[in-house]
Image (cartoon, helix red, strand yellow):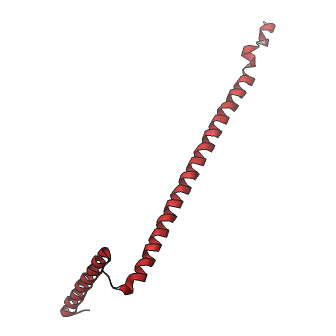
Amino acid sequence: MLAVGDQYNNLAYTKVYIKVMEMELFMDNFQVGDPRRENERRDMRERRDMRDMRDMRDMRNMREMREEFNRRMEFDRRHEMERREEFDRRHDFDLRFPFWWFFL
């Protein structure tokens, strides 16, 4: 169980830490940081660029896969329609050639 003073202390430290982080973000935004962080910033930029390139590549791959899937589905649909038309042409011969007329 924390005492009241400890809670206030933690809150104060948290506020100070948040302020420090805000100042660091501000410095990062305006590129007026210490030169010791330059390597970290460059690494973060490179990681961000690599991540963006990977995301673009993944989106391109997904788009290509979706287009390929749509092409195959269209082909299958067309092929199925042709197959059904062929089936219908083969199986409605009893109407085109009504052999049962001869037995009337």
Q: Position of residue 50 (x, y in %)?
A: 49, 69
Q: Which residue is depicted at the point 18% across and 91% down?
A: 4
Q: Which residue is depicted at the point 56% across and 56% down?
A: 61
Q: Which residue is depicted at the point 29% across and 75% down?
A: 30
Apparent side of residue 72 relative to residue 37 in the rendered image (left or right): right
- Indicate the quadrant containing the C terminus: top left, top right, bottom left or bottom right: top right
Q: Position of residue 71 (x, y in %)?
A: 60, 43
Q: Nearer the viewer, residue 15 or 64?
A: 64
Q: Position of residue 96 (x, y in %)?
A: 73, 14
Q: Which residue is depicted at the point 30% across and 77% down?
A: 25
Apparent side of residue 22 relative to residue 99 in the rendered image (left or right): left
Q: Nearer the viewer, residue 42 or 18?
A: 42
- Indicate the quadrant containing the N terminus: top left, top right, bottom left or bottom right: bottom left
In this view, which residue lies farthest toward the top? 104
In this view, which residue lies farthest toward the right? 102
Q: How many marks?
A: 0
With respect to residue 76, does 13 lie above or below? below
Q: Nearer the viewer, residue 102 or 5?
A: 5
Q: Position of residue 58 (x, y in %)?
A: 53, 60
With respect to residue 51, does 15 lie above or below? below
With respect to residue 82, does 18 lie above or below? below
Apparent side of residue 15 relative to residue 75 in the rendered image (left or right): left
With respect to residue 16, does 76 lie above or below? above
